[in-house]
Amino acid sequence: MRVTACFGLWIMGLLPLSGCAGKSGPDHASRDKPKDTSAADFCMRVAGEDFPAFKQNLLQRIASSSCPADCPLNEKEFHPGSPREDSLGQRILLIDDAVELPALTRYRSRTIANVRLQGSGRYVETVWKTSINPDALAILETINNHERFIPMTCLDMAMPYLERFGAQLPQLAGHGMDILPSLADANPKAQFVVSEDQLSDILSQERICPLLNNEEAAWSNLEQTMHETRDSLVTLIRKYAINYVHLSWGLEDKGLRERFQSCGKKQPSAETVERILNLFGNLFQNITHVQSPTERGLQPVYIFQAAPSATYPLTRDDQLYSLDCRSIPGRIRVTAASYHGFDVPGEGGPAPFALASHEANGKACTDFYVVTGYKGLFDPEARAARIPSGPLGLGHLPSPSWPSASSFANPLGLSFFLYERQKAPQSRHDEILKALINKSSPQVYDPLLHQQLQIFKE
């Protein structure tokens, strides 16, 4: 699990949380505010006129809590919410790692199922359990039970909450702990099926190492495992009317080769790698062949996946990126674009002019780019409108965890697609997608700067 350096030091007790402060540029601060006259107006419009009193009550409860000094941990089960009619067309299967019960509790009404990967390769529904103190849990449940959606920017209580309860929480940071809040915040009507097990977890050491000797029994086992994965995911998609599958990292050509390093010095042949990647390519195709119900009729399921970066310019036929770069209808590849002071117009712009080399190298394997608002990869300098670090969905941390990286641009890319979908209620999904990516060169979009997210239209 990857966390920011300062946040990790705080977890170990070596740095106060207040010391985790990053720099952000003031140049765009006024322009990047919501279009209401003030942030307070925006929050009351979205969360309700009683929100200021609601928030103040929560802050008082945090400050007056006796935890952790006099606060025993309780075992807690997570029981998800129920599917809502208004989320049809905005149901997302989030397959990621580092998603824990506190985040799911905060979004309980938005989460309609939790799944885990079994040894057989099947994703099955499960009840997640953890230990948490009652005061910390009560805050999360109170937020979840509020009658209106509350953006994490409006809550703005991550710091006091973590200062008070962080030492007793089972997990504070990680990829999925930011991706879930990012998707939920940008898309207030969306609901989620959440898995904390990545697709790449299928490729255990015991399963892949025998492939180095080209053992047919091992290949048969892997193929059967992939069939179980395919069937279980398609079943979940149909059961919950899932419209989108969100994949960040955890499954790419480079990562596959790295998994073989646990097998010893012998490395897989190109044919072995290609055969495994073909199994995953077939899995993707099975998913995108499913049609799911929406409020505008049956529409294809799309997979949004973070696109690759490389140390050299890629081509569609690059053998080292044969899964990353192959064309799979219904799979949309999103890459991050860092911010260098060039404003992309609201309708998007051509890719090459302001991309860092690691971003531009993946151009041939990218459908579109999203500006993240950061100066560079894991560079804390950022403008006001940037992809935030929002653990538990309680507010932004002052220092970023996941800035100019494709895995964090990916949820913003999906959210931008949902915004374009909202603008065109009569259009089919393929028509919306074609308008975004059917270009001679992948376009760069900046939905944060231009407020092209559903949250700004609520």
Image (cartoon, rainbow, N blue to C red):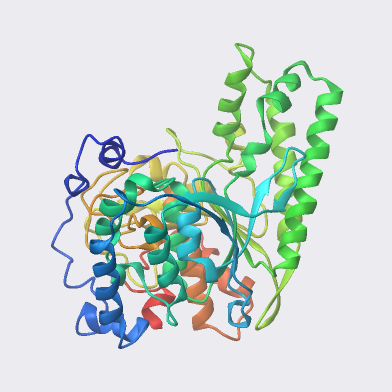
**Residue 31 placed where, x, y %?**
20, 73
Question: Which quarter of the figure has residue 142?
Answer: bottom left
Where 2 falls versus 101 (above or below)?
above
- Number of labels in the image equals 0
Q: Quadrant of the N terminus?
A: top left
**Residue 137 placed where, x, y %?**
42, 60
Task: Name the side, left or right, on which 61 lies relative to 348.
Answer: left
Where 395 falls versus 16 (above or below)?
below
Question: Which quarter of the figure has residue 209?
Answer: top right
**Residue positioned most to the left:** 26
Task: Name the side, left or right, on which 124 lies relative to 362.
Answer: right
Front residue of this view, candidates 435 and 388:
388
**Residue positioned most to the top:** 265
Can residue 379 be seen here? The reply is: yes
Where 365 falls versus 38 (above or below)?
above
Question: Which quarter of the figure has residue 194?
Answer: bottom right
Task: Name the side, left or right, on which 330 lies relative to 65.
Answer: right
**Residue 41 placed where, x, y %?**
24, 84
Q: Quadrant of the C terminus?
A: bottom left
Where 135 falls versus 87 (above or below)?
above
**Residue positioned most to the front:** 70
Can residue 434 be seen here? The reply is: no
Q: Residue at x 52, y 49 (%)?
A: 130
Task: Name the side, left or right, on which 90 lies relative to 446.
Answer: right
**Residue 417 placed where, x, y %?**
51, 69
Q: Residue at x 43, y 41 (%)?
A: 361
